C-alpha cells in the first residue's frame, strides 16, 4: 500500500487522539508481558501486578529458555523446510494456473480454494490414521505420526491452496508476451518457468515464505494431534508450561515472548510482504 | 485437433497433478472419510464400526454439553465478528484520509496477527483473571484503580464467551483494518469529488459513495472472521484450558477423541464444524471466482 497524501480532514486532532488511545489499548498486553517477565518471584503478587519491577532480573527468562529451547528448535525444523516446500509447490501450481491453463482450470482452482477454508478438525482423525498407517508401512516409528516429518507433510499439503493463490495472483501480472516470446525462441513450459518466471518471482516467494513460516510456527492444532513429546514444537511446549499451575507468571510470560520472537522479527523486517500476504488471503489480487 | 491442443496444455496439467492428487486425498478424501466415520457406531478404538446412517448426528443433540458448546460458539462468533468488524472499520475510517505516523499506527494495530494464539492466550488469561478485591490481578485490578466494576470475564456463565472474544478481537481487528483501508483507498477520488459537486455533504459522500463500494471488502472480512470463529480452538485452550465453562465444538471434539476415545463422536462434531463453515464459504467462493472471470 502506498502512502497517500494527507487530505483535508474533519477533526484531525480528534482522529489522532483516538488512534493514540487505541495504540495504548493494543500495547497493554505487551506491557504486561514485558514487565512481568522481568520480575523476580517475590514481586509476583497481585498488589503489584501493574507496577514496574523494583528489581529487574532475567531469572524468568533463563528458566523459560531452558524449558522452551527444544520446542524452539523443533519449530525451526518444522517451519523452515515446511515453508520452502510450500513455496516450490505453490509456485509451480500458480504458474500453470495463470499461464498454461488447461480445460477445467477454473473449476480446479475453486476446488483448491475451498481447501483454504476447511476447518482442520474435519480432516484430523483420518489424517492421524493415515500417518499411523505410514509409520507401520515404512517401519519408521515416530516419523510420520508423532514426528516432525508428518507435521511438515500436513502443513505443506494444507498450505497448497493459499500458496497457489498467492503465486497465481502474482503471475497473472506478468505479461503473457514474455512467455510467448520464450516459446517462439523454442523454450518449453519448464524452460519458460525457469528462465522467465522464476527470476521475477521474488516478491511472491517472500510473501509465501512469511505466510507459511508464520502459520507453521504458530500452529497448535496439528501439532497437538500429530506430534509426540520429543517433537513438540514451541506452541505445544508453551501451552504445557503455562498450563502447569506451579509455573510463576514471570516464567510463563517470558516463555510467551521467547516463542514469539521469530515471527515478530519477520513481521518487523518484512512487514510490507506480510501485509501483501494478508491481502492475498482475502482473495484480493 | 484436440490432440494438437492437448500438447499445449498437457505439460501444465502434468505439473499440477501432484497437487491435484494431494488435495484430492487430503482435503476431499479425508473430509469424506471423516463423514463416513461419523456415520458408523465406532464408539471405541477397537470395534469395526457398522454403518448407522445419521444417527450420531441426531443423538448428539441429546447431550447437554453439545448444546452448551454450540451456544458458546454462537455467542463467541457474534461477539468476535461484530467486534472485529466494527473496530477494524473504525481504525481504517480514522486513518483513511492519511494521518501523520500512519505507517506506525498500522504496524502497531497489525502486529498481534504475527503472534500465536497460544502466546497471547497466556497474557490474556492473566488480564482476564476473575479474582476480585485484594486478589485482583490483570484488568480487574486496573479497573478497580480507575473505578470501573470488576468482572468475571470468561468465567461468567452468560457473557463469558463474549469476554473470550476480546483477545480474538485484539488479534484480528488490525487485519480487518488493513482490508478496509485498502477498500477506502480503492474508492476513486473522482467519485467522491463528483458527489461533492452534486451537493453531498462529507457524510453524504460516505453514505452514498464510499460505504456501498466497501461491501465486497466487508463480505471478505466477514467470511474470513466467520470461518476462524467457528473452528476456534487454540485461543480457548490457551486462555481457559479445557474447562466446560468455555467449551466450544472444537474443544469438545478434542475431548471426544483423546479423553473419551470415541472416534465416531469426534468425527460427528468435526462434520458439524465443517458443515457450518461450508454453508457460507462455498457460495462465497463460487461468487468470487465468477466475479473475477467476468472482469
Image (spheres, coloured by chain):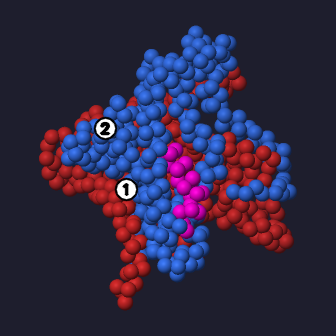
Chain colours: A blue, B red
- Where is the C terminus of chain A found, in terms of image quarters? bottom right
- Most common SS among magenta residues: helix
Q: Which of the pair A209/B128 is nearer the observer?
A: A209
The secondary element bearing badge 2 is classed as loop
Report x, y in % for residue A50: 65, 21
In the picture of the structure, the residue carrying the numbered disc 1 is B275
Q: What is the quadrant of residue B172 in the picture?
A: top right
The residue range painted magenta reads A196-215
Residue that appears at 78% across and 57% down: A4
Chain to which the residue tagged by mark 2 belongs: A
In the picture of the structure, the residue carrying the numbered disc 2 is A146
Classify 10 Å Cα crowding around label 1: few (below 14), some (14-19), many (20 and above): some
Q: Is residue A85 left or right of residue B42?
A: right
Report x, y in % for residue B187: 71, 65
Camera-near label (2 vs 1) is 2
Q: CA distance from mark 2 to mark 1?
A: 29 Å
The secondary element bearing badge 1 is classed as helix
Amino acid at each position: 500500500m502506498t502512502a497517500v497524501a494527507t487530505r483535508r480532514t474533519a477533526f484531525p486532532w480528534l482522529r489522532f487522539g483516538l488512534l493514540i488511545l487505541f495504540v495504548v489499548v493494543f500495547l497493554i498486553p505487551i506491557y504486561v508481558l514485558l514487565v512481568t517477565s522481568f520480575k523476580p518471584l517475590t514481586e509476583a503478587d497481585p498488589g503489584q501486578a501493574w507496577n514496574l519491577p523494583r528489581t529487574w532480573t532475567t531469572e524468568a527468562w533463563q528458566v523459560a529458555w531452558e524449558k522452551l529451547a527444544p520446542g524452539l528448535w523443533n519449530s525451526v525444523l518444522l517451519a523452515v523446510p515446511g515453508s520452502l516446500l510450500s513455496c516450490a509447490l505453490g509456485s509451480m501450481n500458480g504458474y500453470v494456473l495463470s499461464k498454461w491453463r488447461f480445460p477445467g482450470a477454473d473449476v480446479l482452482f475453486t476446488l483448491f480454494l475451498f481447501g483454504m477454508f476447511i476447518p482442520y478438525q474435519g480432516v484430523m482423525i483420518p489424517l492421524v490414521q493415515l500417518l499411523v498407517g505410514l509409520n507401520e508401512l515404512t517401519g519408521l516409528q515416530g516419523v510420520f505420526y508423532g514426528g516432525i516429518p508428518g507435521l511438515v507433510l500436513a502443513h505443506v499439503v494444507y498450505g497448497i491452496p493459499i500458496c497457489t493463490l498467492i503465486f497465481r495472483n502474482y503471475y497473472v501480472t506478468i505479461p503473457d508476451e514474455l512467455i510467448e516470446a520464450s516459446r517462439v525462441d523454442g523454450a518449453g513450459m519448464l524452460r519458460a518457468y525457469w528462465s522467465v518466471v522464476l527470476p521475477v518471482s521474488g516478491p511472491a516467494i517472500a510473501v509465501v515464505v512469511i505466510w507459511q513460516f508464520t502459520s507453521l510456527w504458530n500452529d497448535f492444532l496439528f501439532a497437538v494431534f500429530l506430534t509426540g513429546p520429543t517433537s513438540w514444537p514451541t506452541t505445544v511446549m508453551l501451552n504445557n508450561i503455562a498450563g502447569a499451575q506451579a509455573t510463576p507468571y514471570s516464567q510463563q510470560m517470558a516463555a510467551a515472548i521467547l516463542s514469539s520472537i521469530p515471527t515478530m522479527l519477520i513481521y518487523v523486517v518484512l512487514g510490507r510482504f506480510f501485509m501483501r500476504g494478508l491481502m492475498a488471503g482475502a482473495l484480493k489480487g | 485437433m484436440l490432440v494438437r491442443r492437448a500438447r499445449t496444455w498437457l505439460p501444465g496439467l502434468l505439473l499440477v497433478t501432484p497437487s491435484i492428487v494431494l488435495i484430492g486425498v487430503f482435503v476431499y478424501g479425508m473430509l469424506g472419510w471423516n463423514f463416513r466415520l461419523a456415520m458408523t457406531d465406532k464408539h471405541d478404538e477397537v470395534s469395526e464400526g457398522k454403518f448407522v446412517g445419521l444417527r450420531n448426528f441426531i443423538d448428539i443433540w441429546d447431550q447437554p454439553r453439545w448444546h452448551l458448546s454450540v451456544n458458546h460458539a454462537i455467542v463467541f462468533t457474534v461477539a468476535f465478528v461484530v467486534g472485529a468488524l466494527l473496530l477494524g472499520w473504525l481504525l481504517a475510517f480514522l486513518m483513511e484520509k492519511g494521518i501523520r505516523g500512519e505507517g506506525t499506527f498500522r504496524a502497531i494495530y497489525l502486529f498481534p496477527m504475527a503472534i500465536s494464539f497460544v502466546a497471547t492466550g497466556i497474557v490474556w488469561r492473566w488480564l482476564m483473571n476473575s479474582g476480585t478485591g485484594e486478589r485482583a490481578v490483570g484488568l480487574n485490578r486496573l479497573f478497580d484503580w480507575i473505578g470501573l466494576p470488576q468482572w468475571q470475564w470468561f468465567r461468567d456463565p452468560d457473557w463469558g464467551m463474549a469476554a473470550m472474544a476480546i483477545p480474538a478481537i485484539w488479534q484480528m481487528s488490525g487485519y480487518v483494518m488493513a482490508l478496509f483501508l485498502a477498500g477506502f483507498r480503492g474508492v476513486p477520488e473522482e467519485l467522491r469529488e463528483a458527489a461533492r459537486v452534486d451537493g453531498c455533504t462529507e457524510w453524504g459522500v460516505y453514505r452514498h459513495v464510499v460505504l456501498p463500494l466497501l461491501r465486497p471488502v466487508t463480505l471478505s472480512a466477514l467470511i474470513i472472521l466467520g470461518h476462524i470463529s467457528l473452528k476456534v480452538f487454540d485461543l480457548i485452550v490457551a486462555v481457559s484450558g479445557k474447562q466446560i465453562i468455555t467449551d466450544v465444538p472444537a474443544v469438545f471434539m478434542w475431548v471426544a477423541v483423546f479423553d473419551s476415545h470415541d472416534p465416531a463422536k469426534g468425527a460427528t462434531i468435526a462434520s458439524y464444524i465443517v458443515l457450518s463453515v461450508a454453508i457460507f464459504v462455498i457460495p462465497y467462493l463460487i461468487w468470487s471466482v465468477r466475479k473475477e472471470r467476468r472482469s
